[in-house]
Amino acid sequence: MNNGFDGGSRSKTLVTAEAVARRLGVTVDTVYRLAHGRRLAFVRVASCMRFAPEHVEAFIAKHLVEPK
């Protein structure tokens, strides 16, 4: 199954907060907190939040801590 993060043909598919939480290894509440704080980009679809995989990957890259 394509979860939007594996670069398959459907990689432009928006994903749920649950999928983002699994990718980041955090809780769904943390994903919503990041989104509400405008630290993680999201798309509002009616009353739902959806996330573009490329925005999640950009978030990861932005918060990467390099070794010394």
Image: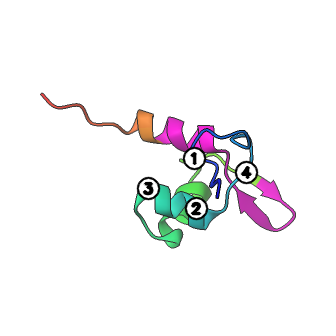
Determine whether 7 is above or below 1 in the image: above
**Nearer the observer, disc 1 or disc 4?**
1
Asked if the residues shown at circle 2 and circle 3 are in contact, with their CB atoms under 8 angstroms apart, the answer is: no
Asked if the residues shown at circle 1 and circle 4 are in contact, with their CB atoms under 8 angstroms apart, the answer is: no
Name the side, left or right, on which 29 lies relative to 55: left
The N terminus appears in which quarter of the rendering?
A: bottom right
Name the side, left or right, on which 66 lies relative to 6: left
Question: What residue is shown with label 2?
Answer: 19
Determine whether 57 is above or below 46 in the image: above
Residues in magenta, as a range: 44-59
Question: What residue is shown with label 4?
Answer: 14
Question: What residue is shown with label 1?
Answer: 5
Q: Residues within 10 Å of mark 1 (few under 14, many from 20)?
A: many
Residue 11, horizontal then vertical, whole percent = 68, 41
Name the side, left or right, on which 17 lies relative to 46: left
Query: Of marks 2 and 4, which one's residue comes earlier in the chain?
Result: 4
Query: Of marks 2 and 1, which one's residue comes earlier in the chain?
Result: 1
Q: Amino acid at mark 1?
A: Phe
Query: Of marks 3 and 1, which one's residue comes earlier in the chain?
Result: 1
Gap in angstroms between the C-alphas marked 2 and 3: 9 Å
Q: Residues within 10 Å of mark 4 (few under 14, many from 20)?
A: some
SS type, badge 2: helix
Gap in angstroms between the C-alphas marked 1 and 4: 10 Å
Asked if the residues shown at circle 2 and circle 1 are in contact, with their CB atoms under 8 angstroms apart, the answer is: yes
The single residue placed furthest to the top in the displayed view is 68
Q: Amino acid at mark 3?
A: Leu
Gap in angstroms between the C-alphas marked 2 and 1: 9 Å
**Nearer the observer, disc 3 or disc 1?**
1
Residue 66, horizontal then vertical, whole percent = 23, 31
Question: What residue is shown with label 3?
Answer: 24
